[in-house]
Image (tube, rainbow, N blue to C red):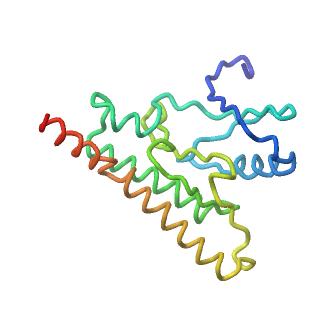
Amino acid sequence: MLNGLTKVVAVKRLDNISNQGEREFQNEMRIIGRTHHQNLVRLLGYCHDGANRLLIYEYMINGSLSDVLFTPERRPCWIDRVEIARDVARGLLYLHEECDTQIIHCDIKSQNILMDENRQAKISVGRERDFAVLVEKAMIAEEVKRAEKQNREKDRNRFRRDSGPSGGANRIIKRAKVEKLV
């Protein structure tokens, strides 16, 4: 409860982090905590007590995009799918180009795109092992620049495959064909 208001939050418990130093954890929280965009799930805070660590995020009541796409009664119409694709594209643009510390997500998939109460899509930014933090471009070696370009392209390809307007429709179509055969 904050200022007399009750707010539902999502709490993620971190496991297997005993090898991670306090300094590295604090740096991750600083980077993730500074990423503020309407199409990113917001980190509200964190708690750490030795090896016990919790991340507190805004709660996404409609679950993941995967849940929405593969539950027939919740499946969005094509107009809504295009809006979801726009939301994800805006979030990726922010991470890749507009964020103070540029981030390549490295794990864009429908399970990591969450839907708020208005069915607005938000990218879940996990921990540093799940994304690549980029330093100032002037300091990046040529081979790192090539890898950065490849990773951005991977983010975009995953977005097109899993989150684009078809949003996994290929899997739905394949499943329907199998069901017709049976």
For residue 71, side relative to residue 53 (left or right): left
Extreme-bottom residue of the structure: 142
Residue 9 % position (x, y): 63, 27
For residue 165, side relative to residue 114 (left or right): left
Residue 153's place in the image compared with 46, above or below, is below
Quarter of the image with the N terminus is top right
Tally of numbered tags: 0
Extreme-front residue of the structure: 182
**Which residue is located at x 53 percent, y 71 percent?**
150
For residue 61, side relative to residue 133 (left or right): left
Residue 98 % position (x, y): 61, 63
Residue 140 % position (x, y): 71, 77
Quarter of the image with the C terminus is top left
The one of 95 and 52 positioned closer to us in this rendering: 52
**Which residue is located at x 53 percent, y 66 percent?**
152
Residue 80 % position (x, y): 32, 43
**Which residue is located at x 23 percent, y 45 percent?**
174
Q: Quadrant of residue 131?
A: bottom right
Extreme-left residue of the structure: 181
The one of 124 and 175 positioned closer to us in this rendering: 175
Q: Quadrant of residue 101?
A: bottom right
Residue 143's place in the image compared with 20, above or below, is below
